[in-house]
Amino acid sequence: MTDDAIPLQSDADQRAIAALRRKNAVWRRILKDPPAALAALFLLLVVAAAILAPWIAPFDPYSNNMRLRLCPIGGARCPDFLLGADQQGRDMVSRMLFGLRSTLGIGVIAVLIGGSIGAGIGLMAAFYRRLDTPLMRLVDVLLSFPAILFGLAIAAVVGTGLFGLILALCVTSVPSIARIARGAAQSVMQQEYMEAGRAVGLGDGALIWRYLAINCWPTILIYMTLQLGQAILLGAALSFLGLGAQAPTAELGSMAADGRKFLSIAPHVSTLPCAAIFLVVLAFNVLGDALRDALDPKLRQ
Amino acid sequence: MISMPVLLGVLLIGFLLLQVVPTDPATVSAGPSATKADIEAIRQQMGLDKPVWLQFVLYLGRVLQLDLGRSMISNRAVSEEIGLTLWPTVELMLACLIWAVPLGILLGTLAARRRGTLIDRFIMGLSVMGVSVPVFWVGLLLIQYVGGAGLLPFQGRDGPIWTPSGLHSIILPAITLGAVFVGPVARMTRTSLLETLSADYVRTARAKGASDWRVTIHHALRNALIPVVTLVGLQIGFLLGGSIVTETMFAWPGVGRMAVGAITSSDFPLAQGAILILAVGFMTVNLIVDVLYAYLDPRIARR
């Protein structure tokens, strides 16, 4: 028996190594792309600030001081407030930090729940061929429907507030994640280890959970992150309309709406939250484009 | 038709909204001096004693006859309220599309022709910013700098678009709404044009000695526009979201503003009607896009 009989690297090994190389190449590409790297760094900082808000905020975002009402940035009345004060004399820096926290938090919760449901649908569609058409048809229907109408309809039925807002954002993030999950799961389904798993007598549940889901989740997680940008934008719009987060809550969309009455005398009160939403969503989109380019071999030159 | 189940879902939501109305419709229409027997008679007459599924069927029948109930606040028929607000919304959307789509196609074509250059990067950068910016920020900036300076009106609608004052009042809302729409159109045009520019017939046209711009405009763009039309159709939903925010900000008397107002003031019948008409409108536009598609690409019509 010679060494040739047992090749050092089987086909599957080589494919696995190639896959690993591709994955590393993705991150290398992103770090080499200055806008994408900058966006990633910015998001890292923003998420850290949102998580640490209760500890790093200089003041209580809910304690008002009417004497400092609408104090401009750098105003002599409020030397301690770096970004001025809002219509109730609350520190804008602290409001922004807490606003970021709730805006991001709402998005994360909604995308995690909705994305998990979507991922479940996608995996099922790929695993059980018979379910593929009906499930994907349902997903197409959900996808074809404007997200804002879900928001309106849900707010109308369950009333305005955080619950309805999160529910609406959940529903809108289900279909796109379902599509991604199905695509990822279909390529995993063609791997030999799926067949091997079945051959050693694993049940459907074990196959789906231990073989299929575990190999799909990196892709799904990446797309869930990207979905966050959209969820944040929609959530802010619904809150701006008064259908989401309600008055005292520091949330960027409703802060922008509250501040717009003072646009001519204190533009910073609504401009700052708007700019924050814009920058966060922009960073998500720039990073998302870079990731998509890196993951899509057709676009790679 | 794929939207049929959605339509049914929306109708179900509409029906549900009418069920949660806190007051009993029979008691209300019977008036304060009615006896218990009177109320019971009216209840039977209105079909409120029937099982829920039958009530839903009756509701569908009423919707088909455009009988959507009465607003709880203004007490006018919901269909009448919708009739008043529908045209302003259509007007706003058309005013947005008429400048945003051509500009998007122009920018996308420019970016594709100058692929990889600074111009391309600049246009694509603008387009990413366009899809990331909250509509309400664009509106706030315009109100602050253009409206605040007294250059253009930013509150309400002064008559139909064909009158000078109406045209004046639609400018700022239309710019706000279109600003977020140029980006996706430019981007899609660029991607799709790059694809068609590498097609065989484009090479043939070049070989026959056609100039660069003639090839782009005459041979490639029409084919490249097919996905753009699809995108515009798909983005109508996106546009709808934008228009709801824009209408609310600029006090534009459209369906979106009415829907938000109805929801926040718990006017359930009006909310039901507004959501229903928004959904139906969205589906109608998609249907129009399908027809347009067949016109742009005769291969589809022949199939």
Image (cartoon, coloured by chain):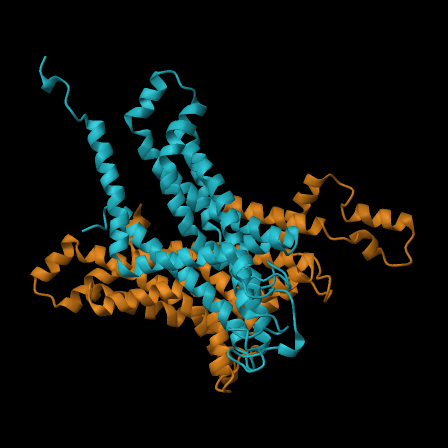
Q: Nearer the viewer, residue B83 or A240?
A: A240
Residue A136, picture quadrant: top left
> Which of the image's four quarters has the C terminus of chain B?
top left
Relative to A44, residue A3 above or below? above
Question: Residue B4, how many percent across, how many down?
Answer: 51, 45
Residue plotted at (48% across, 86% down): B151
Relative to A139, residue A74 above or below? below
Question: Residue A191, how many percent across, how many down?
Answer: 29, 28
The answer to whether A12 appears left or right of B291 in the picture is left
Question: Residue B144, how many percent across, how many down?
Answer: 50, 80
Color of chain B here?
orange
The answer to whether A207 appears left or right of A64 in the picture is left
Task: Kindly tell me whether residue B2 is visible in this rendering.
Answer: no
Residue plotted at (45% across, 59% down): B238
Residue B196, picture quadrant: bottom left
Color of chain A here?
cyan
The answer to whether B123 appears left or right of B46 in the picture is left
**Farthest-out residue, top:** A1
Relative to B263, residue A200 above or below? above
Question: Residue A10, how many percent across, how many down?
Answer: 19, 25
Task: Kindly tell me whether residue B172 is visible in this rendering.
Answer: yes
Count of numbered circles on the image: 0
